[in-house]
Amino acid sequence: MAKAAIMGYGTVGSGVYDIIKTNAEKLSRSSNGEEIELKYILDIRDFDNHPEKELFTKDFNDILSDGEVSVVAEVMGGLHPAYEFTKQLLEAGKSVVTSNKELVATYGEELLAIAREKNVNYFFEASVGGGIPVIRPIHQCLTANNIIRIAGILNGTTNYILNQMIKNGKTFDSALKDAQAKGFAERNPAADIEGHDACRKIAILASLASGKTIDYNDIETEGITSITLDDVKYAAAMDSAVKLIGYAYFNEDGTVYSIVSPMIIKNDSPLSGVDGVFNAILITGDCVGDVMFYGKGAGKLPTASAVVADIVDAVKHRVTSKKIFWEKQTDNVMAHKDSRKFSYFIRTADNAENIRKIFGKCEFVDNIADGESAFVSEPLTQSEADEKTAELRNVITKLRVMD
Ligand code: HSE
């Protein structure tokens, strides 16, 4: 019998509880016959009407000091006290599994090192892509490859909002309210719509793929707040879609170019048809070529399914550390912002003659709104794109076209 605890009884925590209860037999088979018994649920709120109200505690020390508890699911979110709790649990020789991307992106290197030293595990499959298996595939199945590029739709809330705006004509605000009601959005949804959540997730994937800490603070991040329905219509007219993309390119010299930004995705990319709360992560390896991981990126049961799978894995590897980790960043591993070129889709009040004078060769798109021109540039560095765009009159939109 393996004894477990849950810290945080919100959307994901209650999903973890439900899965442990409803799929108990299946989980026991997966854990080599060992039953998983839930001993504590930590939450500061009262759950007096819960059918197992005796499991609830407000005291973290109940879990920390209980020698029987070998694995803890940290699904409380936020940095503090999640960081302090996780650190103490790992140091006490307990494995911790988490969906907390903010914590993994910020303190992953340190927490993974403690887990390694203590011969326990810190698993975080649910931190990226909700229910989609992607952390283990990068760590295990793709380990023979040098990863060349990762491009992902990593935030379910923004993908849901964009989709609701396009397909159901919803306003940004009402689509966001829907996403909150469905349990997709962060407590502060600015983390979703301003791209910070996607930024933390691409930082985790890039750290895992490169083996070095990629600090999310070094990743230029732009969200979807400036995207309008007209931008989306232009994209459709170009046989493309607008998606918020977390992007990392791994250069041969060991540096990593990474950015989070809304991009124009051509319909021939498997990412363009990924709609609603679904996420997808397209990974290019030097041996395997392109592989894509697709599924529900947010929500109670999809995310909890990845957390519970980590609990099972931790139970199965109770006395061995799986040694997932990345090294401390010593030199600056981030590539220069001009190390990659993209074509840009630009809308401006300027005329075609001026645009050609500034940008040279470019492809014009039939305009949807009056009094403007829309075009796609040749591939440019970020500095080139910024300098040329600054010469245009009244720029309405500037979006990278994903390569
Ligand atoms: N707010 C996140 C999203 C939850 O919308 O993707 C899953 O990490």
Image: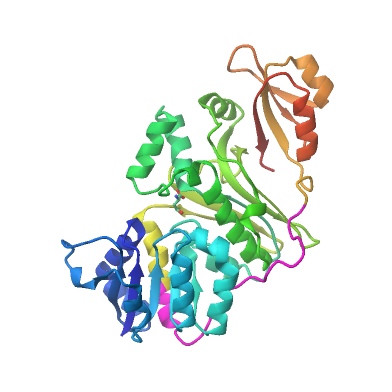
First to last magenta residue range: 311-335
The answer to which of 395 and 402 lies nearer the viewer is 395
Image coords of residue 372 (percent x, y): 65, 16
Image coords of residue 389 (percent x, y): 75, 27
Taking the magenta stretch, the answer to whether it contains residue 324 is yes
- Residue 24 sits in quarter: bottom left
Residue at 54% across / 25% down in the picture?
Answer: 233
Q: Is residue 159 above or below residue 226?
A: below
Residue at 56% across / 31% down in the picture?
Answer: 226
Could one spot residue 52 in this view of the protein? no
- Residue 52 sits in quarter: bottom left
Could one spot residue 121 in this view of the protein? yes
* Quadrant occupied by the C terminus: top right
Q: Is residue 292 above or below residue 347?
A: below
Image coords of residue 376 (percent x, y): 71, 29
Taking the magenta stretch, the answer to whether it contains residue 312 is yes
Q: Is residue 150 above or below residue 174?
A: below
